[in-house]
Amino acid sequence: MRFTLISRLCLQDIQCILTTQIPGQPTGGPRCVLSSETSFLTTEFGLYVGYHLSLGDMNEPSNFLNGQYPGCTHNNLNHPPFVPRISDDSLSQSTLCPDSKTYLGSLYDTHSLFGWSQAAPTFHAIQEATGKRPFVLSRSTFVGNGKYTGHWLGDNHALWEDMHTSIIGILEFNLFGIPQVGADICGFYFDTTFELCLRWTQLGAFYPLSRNHNALGQKEQDPAVFGLEFAAIARSVLQIRYSLLPYLYTLFFEAHTLGNTVARGLMHEFTADPETHGIDTAFLWGSALMIAPVLQEANCWGLAREEKKWKNKTRIVKQIQIAQGPNQNSLNGARFWEKGARSVDVYFPEAHWFDYYTGDKVPASSYKKHVSVHAPLEKIPLFIRGGYILPTQAPATRTARSSCLLDHGPSCFTLTSLPLIDFKSILYIINSRLNAFGLIIALDEQGEASGSLFWDDGESIDTIENGIYFLAKYTYREGHLTTRIVHNSYRGVDSLAYDTLQILGVTSRPKAVTLNGKSLRSKDIHYQGNGVGLVLMSAFMLAFV
């Protein structure tokens, strides 16, 4: 999937709804169309075959002005009797006058539908032009947009408080039915810092939409800029994300077919526990994976006043450091910590929880309590909930088919200094979709677990509606792991196999393990007291005795 088209508001004609702009190509000025017309967009996308991602930006609509020239007429639309608490108490701040007309009606009535109206025609135009599944991303969305577009949370700041509030936005948009959502990792405005950007990269690896993005004029903030240590830590957490893509992809399948959320608050799963209702410092992927990021720098007392300027904007950040714990106070709702936080406060609802990194079970004494969890700089705390099975896949450089490698083989590599290596092995390094699957099985208090795997080619149109996909249901009960094939019409899985299987919560070493009636070799079983690691080539019935 490659990026090419940016949707922009055409400010020269307030009757228009959508502008397309080709980076690096002469445009001869803005070009605008009504959102109900897709033929123009289809032609534009068709000129760039293979590009099937579109970014809709500034489509609130936004224009950096207060209305438009020569100003907003004094009437009930531009100056209504009631104005919500917004910037400058003006409905025209950084946008058009509310009495401006679009084909939808007056902007006063349709402002929130401006970006909404762009999503469907852009989606269909890319689909028609490329014959591939579109990926549309919009800054302005409305309820119902989740069928056609993802969303990012707009311009934020390189501040710890903005990193924290991004979690709230992620959870809200999942409830709005737009699960593909993320924030600008490391902050859009202001220059970020090493530790803030690192902790944000760790959190952002678990946004449904993970993207580092900042404004022109700010310092670079890609992982390589901060040195080898930062790059290694960033690479490690991103590889966790990539290894969990089968689980994440299955969550999106369930969001598409069942209306489920992908990222959800703890309250979503533990509604009877009132302590979870106010938690916005941790969240879940589906029902099974809890992410508890570090959202502060350290735990010491102090007070600071900081001014950071961008263009004509000045933001005064008054923050106070307070003691760590669930009942924290602050000065004017803001906080300040010096560098060095290496622990995080985590609340564990009543369920079996396992440390993602070690497989260790969280002690029952920690249930329904806030617990200080060790969080060194190189780690974001992750916990797997008992009762669930998570499909995994070994990560690689990319998930898509590498046409150069498949068509031309090693000649794709131009560096003559590369050592001779097997061409087939290159494919597995480059393309993760060729790698073997794994399963993480976390047992609940009854010693049971269940999960699913959805898989298709990742780019064809309407694979679910056309039935061209693979769906498996996993069940672990009474020492038996069973795979039930629910739907098997995607031939791309025929060459794939299970490689490793990890069971968390096994209290004693099994005497024997059988796969489809055949005993596994003892050297293929690695018991650690908290789990069993197996090397498998396929999995339909696995029995533990």
Image (cartoon, rainbow, N blue to C red):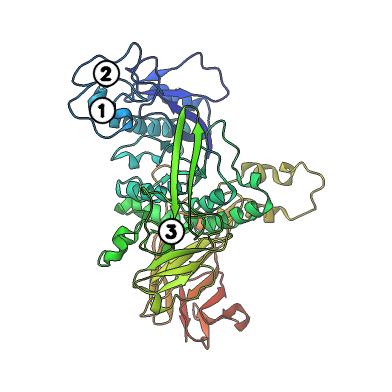
Q: Secondary structure at mark 1?
A: helix
- Residue at horizontal 55%, vertical 61%? 379
Please give left or right for residue 158 compared with residue 325 in the image.
Answer: right
Q: Position of residue 109 (x, y in %)?
A: 22, 27
Q: Which callout, 1 or 3, points at the residue further toward the start of the chain?
A: 1
Q: Position of residue 119 (x, y in %)?
A: 36, 33
Residue closest to the far right: 417
Q: Nearer the viewer, mark 2 or mark 3?
A: 3
**Can the viewer see residue 40 in this picture?**
yes
- Residue at horizontal 30%, vertical 46%? 176
- Residue at horizontal 39%, vertical 18%? 11
Q: Which callout, 1 or 2, points at the residue further toward the start of the chain?
A: 2
Please give left or right for residue 84 compared with residue 344 in the image.
Answer: left
Q: Residues within 10 Å of mark 1 (few under 14, many from 20)?
A: some
Q: Nearer the viewer, mark 1 or mark 3?
A: 3
From the image, tell me which residue sits under label 2.
Answer: 101
**Disc on res. 110:** 1
Which is more toward the observer, 365 or 211?
Answer: 365
Q: Amino acid type of disc 2?
A: Lys
Which is more toward the observer, 535 or 385?
Answer: 385
**Disc on res. 401:** none
Q: Are marks 2 and 3 in contact (CB under 8 Å)?
A: no
Q: Amino acid type of disc 3?
A: Ile
Q: Amino acid type of disc 1?
A: Thr
Query: How many angstroms separate mark 1 from mark 2 (CA)?
Result: 9 Å
From the image, tell me which residue sits under label 3.
Answer: 322
- Residue 77 falls in image quadrant: top left
Please give left or right for residue 415 compared with residue 327 in the image.
Answer: right
